[in-house]
Amino acid sequence: GLYPAPLKILEVIRVGVDKGSDAGYEAESKGFAELAMTPQSKGLMGLFRGQTECKKNRFGTPKQEIKTVAVLGAGLMGAGIAQVSVDKGYNVILKDTSDAGLMRGIGQIYTGLDSSVKRKKIDALERDRFLAN
């Protein structure tokens, strides 16, 4: 659709097939130069630079090791984050606006850990240790 490169590639290949490799290489060089100056090309280069920049840790290593994670909201997402954090060995504090919501979140975590026990990824003792966390 919106990218001009695929059509330009076909055009350049056609020149190379019809007029020979020298003409094809010349068309490729000119086609690349044209494409490099399009707004789409500039946008894709900016996107690449942005993604590369986001991968860098500008904050350095933490001064102290993180041992406890607090999760606000025990809904589906919060309970999932809490479960992954527990699985990774963090102490977790789970908070919700209501006791009922908190209990549902703890129930989801228990269900997830129990599923891991059934699949033999962890044993029941580990599940209970995680829940005591």
Image (cartoon, rainbow, N blue to C red):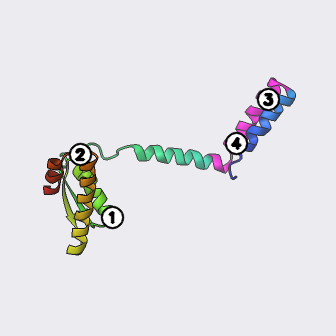
Q: Residue at x 71, y 43 (%)?
A: 6
Q: Kindly indicate the quadrant of the structure image that contains residue 120.
A: top left
| Residue type, mark 3 in image | Gly
Query: In the visual, does 84 lie left or right of 14?
Result: left
Q: Secondary structure at mark 1?
A: helix
Where the C terminus falls, by quadrant?
bottom left
Q: CA distance from mark 3 to mark 2?
A: 54 Å
Q: CA distance from mark 4 to mark 3?
A: 16 Å
| Residue type, mark 2 in image | Pro
Q: Dominant secondary structure of the magenta stretch?
A: helix
- Mark 2 or mark 1, whichever is nearer to me: 1
| Residue type, mark 1 in image | Leu
Q: Secondary structure at mark 2?
A: loop
- The residue that label 2 is drawn on is 62
Q: Residue at x 57, y 44 (%)?
A: 45
- The residue that label 3 is drawn on is 24
Q: Earlier in the sequence, mark 4 or mark 3?
A: 3
- Mark 3 or mark 2, whichever is nearer to me: 3
Q: CA distance from mark 1 to mark 3?
A: 57 Å
- Mark 1 or mark 3, whichever is nearer to me: 1
Mark 2: give few (<14), some (14-19) or many (20+) Cα within 10 Å. Answer: few
Mark 1: give few (<14), some (14-19) or many (20+) Cα within 10 Å. Answer: few
- The residue that label 1 is drawn on is 76
Q: Residue furthest right?
A: 19
- Mark 1 or mark 4, whichever is nearer to me: 1
Marks 4 and 2 close (CB-CB < 8 Å): no
Q: Residue at x 16, y 48 (%)?
A: 126
Instruction: From the top left corner, tell me how far across and down residue 32 is, in percent.
Output: 71, 37
Mark 3: give few (<14), some (14-19) or many (20+) Cα within 10 Å. Answer: some
Q: CA distance from mark 1 to mark 4?
A: 46 Å
Q: Kindly indicate the quadrant of the structure image that contains residue 22.
A: top right
